[in-house]
Image (cartoon, rainbow, N blue to C red):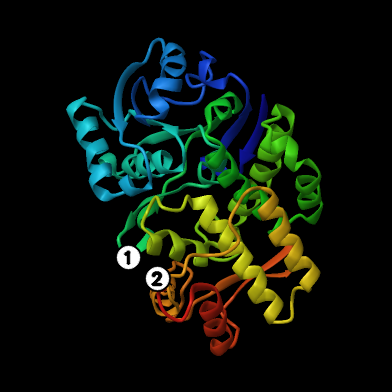
Amino acid sequence: METLTIDLGPRSYPILIGPGLLGESGLLGARIRARDVMLVSNVTVAPLWSPRLTGALAGFRVAQCILPDGEAHKTLATVSQVLDAMVASGLNRDCAVLALGGGVVGDIAGFAAACYQRGVDFVQLPTTLLAQVDSSVGGKTGVDHPRGKNLIGAFHQPVAVLADTDTLRTLPDRELRAGLAEVIKYGLIRDEKFLAWIEANLERLLGRDPAALAHAISVSCQCKAGIVACDEREQGERALLNLGHTFGHAIETGAGYGAWLHGEAVAAGMAMASEFSRRLGWLERADLERVRAVLTRAGLPVDPPRLGRSRALELMRMDKKVRAGRIRLVLLERIGSAVCTGDYPDDALEALLDDQFGSAVS
């Protein structure tokens, strides 16, 4: 087991990475104060992994809330379902919420924990690669709105993250590839050497080599931990973690939640951000082709759906990085160095969206 730390002073917490963690009796008991817990999972993950977890929760009073699976259910109505279950179980402020699943489960359960009696402890138990390298770390919780991704939510840090790498054995191939998009992102924004390692080890990652996956998770979490410790509430540097996300969230929302996985939409968004960076004279064409090549080798899309420029702009204007009505984008100065900026010509962005999304829905 490897242990990393999110350094937030008195609210610091560990990220534990390794095989078999869900079945380790004592790991949770040593890290949460509660004895009453609400286990939140979904209909796909719960049958696979909740028996191992509940077997390690001797001494806890465990209630469960099992949700439907998929991004389409990441709504306020589903959060209400969790809150209703907590009330029905008679849980008080000294309880804890355990989020067992991917990013959707973690976001819903974390938001419910932030809301219940004005905030209770929760633990992230991510079971997808994307959640283990990104969404479980950093305290972003929330749900989608029909007009935009993750528009409703709260910053609420977990008390611990336990990333059991055994869970990746049951992850569908499409979900594994989607998680690799976020891994690649870290190389693009902060660490060219890590990107080179990904390129050299992509077949091992796609083949679920345990050592390769553990290394990818560790480096990704170290990168995110450092950024979150400096900018917990995304007032500056943390925005760089959104490379490709302004375009990607528009894709997810415009295509209909669940049609594109988050990592797939982010991959196409990163390819768009790289192309825009090239058009602005920042990124060399060879570097653009390198970005597209690694995403394609990972089995990820590099071209968005034809939503139409007007629809894409409408959705992008709801992005959380917008300031004073100006869409701010995370772009690449070079491989390994990103910047968040609104300093670009409007006609250049419109031309990009015409080319990529189409001037009208086709």
- Mark with earlier residue (2, 1): 1
Q: Which mark is residue 315?
A: 2
Give left or right: position of 237 versus 161: right
Dot 2 crowding, Cα within 10 Å, few <14, some 14–19, many 20+: many
Q: What residue is at 54 percent from the left and 87 percent from the top?
A: 346
In-image side of 233 versus 69 (left or right): right
Q: Is residue 292 visible?
A: yes
Residue nearest the viewer, comparing 82 with 31: 82
Please rate how many residues cluster around mark 1, counting C-alpha atoms within 10 Å: few if below 14, some from 14 to 19, many from 20: some
Using the image, determine if residue 171 lies above or below residue 267.
Answer: above
Label number found at residue 28: none
The residue nearer to you, when weighing 129 against 190, is 129
Front-lying residue, 48 or 85: 48
2 and 1 marks in contact (CB < 8 Å): yes
What residue is disc 1 on? Answer: 147
Disc 2 is placed on an element classified as helix
As drawn, 87 above or below 151: above
**Residue 208: percent from the left, percent from the top?**
67, 31
Three-letter code, disc 1: Arg
